[in-house]
Amino acid sequence: MDLELSPRYVEFRDECRTWLRDNKPADPLASMDSSVGFEEHRLWERALFEGGWSVPAWPAAYGGRDCDLIEWLIYEEEYWASGVPGRVSANGVSLLAPTIFNFGTRAQQDYFLPRMAGGEHIWAQGWSEPEAGSDLAGIKTIAVRDGDDYVVNGQKIWCSRGKYADWIFCIVRTDPTAERHAGLSYLLVPADAPGITRRTVKRLDQESGFAEIFFDDCRVSADNVLGEPGQGWAVAMAAAGSERGLSLRSPGRFMAAAERLRELAVSEAGSGLDARLRDEVVDAWIRAEAYRWQTYFVAAELMAGGDLGSEASLMKVFWSEMDLELHATALRLLGDEAEVPSDWLDGYVFALGGPIYAGTNEIQRNIIAERVLGLPRR
Amino acid sequence: MLFAFTDEHDMFRDTVRGIFANQCSAEAIRESWDSADGRVRGLWSTLAEVGVLAIMAPTEAGGLGMDEVALVRVLEEAGYGGVPEPLVEHVAVAVPALATAGASEMLVSAISGESTCTVALATGGPNVVAQVAADLVVAEHSGSLLAVDSGALTVAPKDSIDQSRRLAEISFDPDAATLLAGADVALASDRAVLGTAAQCVGVARRLLDFTVEYVKERRQFGKPVGSYQAVKHHLANVRLAIEFSAPLVYRAAWSVAHSDDAAVRGRDVSMAKATASDAVDHSCRAALQCHGAIGYTYEYDLQIWLKRGWSLSGAYGTASQHRDRVAGTLGLLG
């Protein structure tokens, strides 16, 4: 075991750090969930792409720099420590791209990946429906083959970035006679297709974080099915592993948040820090370190040919609850100022969603118990 | 750079796991409770033969010349096996202290298994473990480490709820002891904390395995109790606690082995112990709850690991003591 970064990784880190420092926007961008902020964030995506830092883990042919997992983790640490804007492209880059790499045809890869990397296509996820949340296999949105197209009817909801996104990756039912996990397909839908209506669903903080998306005889080319028709569940679950595991929430953002929390505690503690709050701050810091080292060990296993599998559920529960508790501690430190809008309050509201999205933590704990520990399903 | 254990580490771990499984069964542990010295027959000499006692001794002194990274892997197994021998004290603390001080006779005797060492460190509080089995005590005194012969001690034995821990308060005449010149008290303490954290993780893993097996078999309302979501979530939480404490132990092991910065070393060790203590406490609670009444009995072997968990959780500092130490390194103590 050797936990010191070797010289080539140090060089990589320095290059990344320098670029982020030199290219950080002078002023904070507007919220990516507003029409103005969305386009500002798209420009930031473009800047990252032109600097070669949009999708560093991808092959060079698609705009990446062929980073290995360790380099990618270093990049993420630097990214979040630098205070540059968040990634409006996260749905696409973190969730869809691994699926396109695994299941896409060459034509799909050549078309979608460069456009995703450059910020030309910003993606939203169209999985959940009013009646299909944790029980995702209850999907009712139907896509009927008609010539070279599918005709889509139904409704998706809780689509982050859904109001302004250019494309939507959906799970739809292509075989109406099949039930549950069978007969589903993974369909890539242009958001401007006729027959699509998008409506904002305000989050509890009044931000327009989500959309509900209605499909009314919406025609989508059959070329846009990702993977085999009818195999949508398997294709989707491969992406769900990415979502829960490494690619959505690298340790970098939590390490940066824990350090900001430490600074907040030091600055708020002019008259001495309450012992219980001090313990909470320490815990946040320790957890971020734990997540960091666990991630590095997992990354090393993956690089040696291992498989993350159901263990991704352990990661998801851990980071989402760590993030929530970290922000709750920040609000307790702020005391009666906590209710006044601030980055900490925004962060708290965002973190509240963590245990719910990407598969609720109750579902994740079932997966841990059944697939990691081997307990009986029923 | 390698964020993983080497094949050598893994093979050594597997060897030790096999030894504990064969020679340190629950039955053997219960027998040790009835013995005068609290030891498992024959185990110490086997551990000497395969080099466990010599992990931290330099090769030129006949040791394995390995470091804390190899050590924590073995101590995790000792926790898993419920091993009652003073492995943390002997292997992690005493042997490297004797080696640093160039106390070659005492060192040779310790790594050959001829002698058994325990330690008396301020971080460990007044209760010395396994004094009754020890020939030598490496004791902290006025900022130094001394080697004290067992015969030179005044001893007041104390009971522990864990019958594998034969406690004693000791006193001695420092003038009759040997100074271990050059041996660092802070480093010795960090090693004791680190080794205990590793054992806590091993104990937690054993409690989880024990409980998973039980809830798969035990049926109520016509189904295995392990099929109920309430039980599943308890055990998923235990697995989470273990999953995110082990890497801090490995990280701390690496820091102790490689960092020259005592503050970094101390911070990493305390992060590991705080988390491992919490993990084992959590495991004890969940294991007992998921077993129900049978887990509450003396006859059922779960109690061996429950009691080890309770005692090791506080040994060489509780979670909150170690959190305070981390707070200090983070600039949170004002």
Image: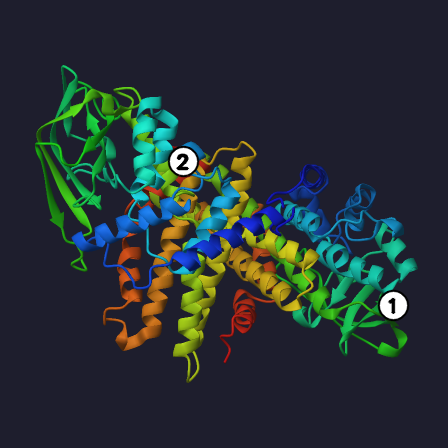
Residue type (three-letter) at the residue carrying disc 1: Gly
Q: Chain of mark 2?
A: A
Residue A331 placed where, x, y %?
Answer: 31, 69
Within 10 Å of the Cα at label 2, are there few (<14), some (14-19), or many (20+) other Cα atoms? Answer: some
For this rendering, which residue is in front, A207 or B273? A207
Q: Position of residue A178 (x, y in %)?
A: 20, 19
Side (left or right) of B204 relative to A266:
right
* Badge 1 and badge 2 in a common chain: no
Seen in the picture, residue B5 relative to B323 is either above or below; the reply is: above
Please state which of the two labelled residues, at mark 1 or mark 2, is closer to the viewer: 2
Question: Which residue type does callout 2 highlight?
Answer: Glu
Real-space Cα distance between discs 1 and 2?
55 Å
Q: Which mark is residue B75?
A: none
Please give the name of the residue rendered at 14% of the width and 14% of the height, measured from the top-left corner: A147
**Residue A339 drawn above or below residue A226:** below
Which quadrant of the view contains residue B141? bottom right
Residue located beneath label 1 in the image: B151
Residues tagged 1 and 2 counted as in contact (Cβ below 8 A): no
Q: Nearer the viewer, residue B47 or A143?
A: A143
Image location (x, y in percent) of residue A303: 54, 36
Q: Which residue is mark 2?
A: A370
Instruction: Label 1, secondary structure: give it.
Output: helix
Q: Chain of mark 1?
A: B
- Estimate the x, y position of residue B174 in percent, counting from the top left: 84, 77
User: In the picture shown, does residue A130 fall above or below B121?
Assistant: above
| Number of marks present in the image shown | 2
- Give the residue at x 84% y 59%: B99
Query: At 68% across and 61% down in the image, what residue appears?
Result: B192
Of A320 and B129, nearer the camera is A320
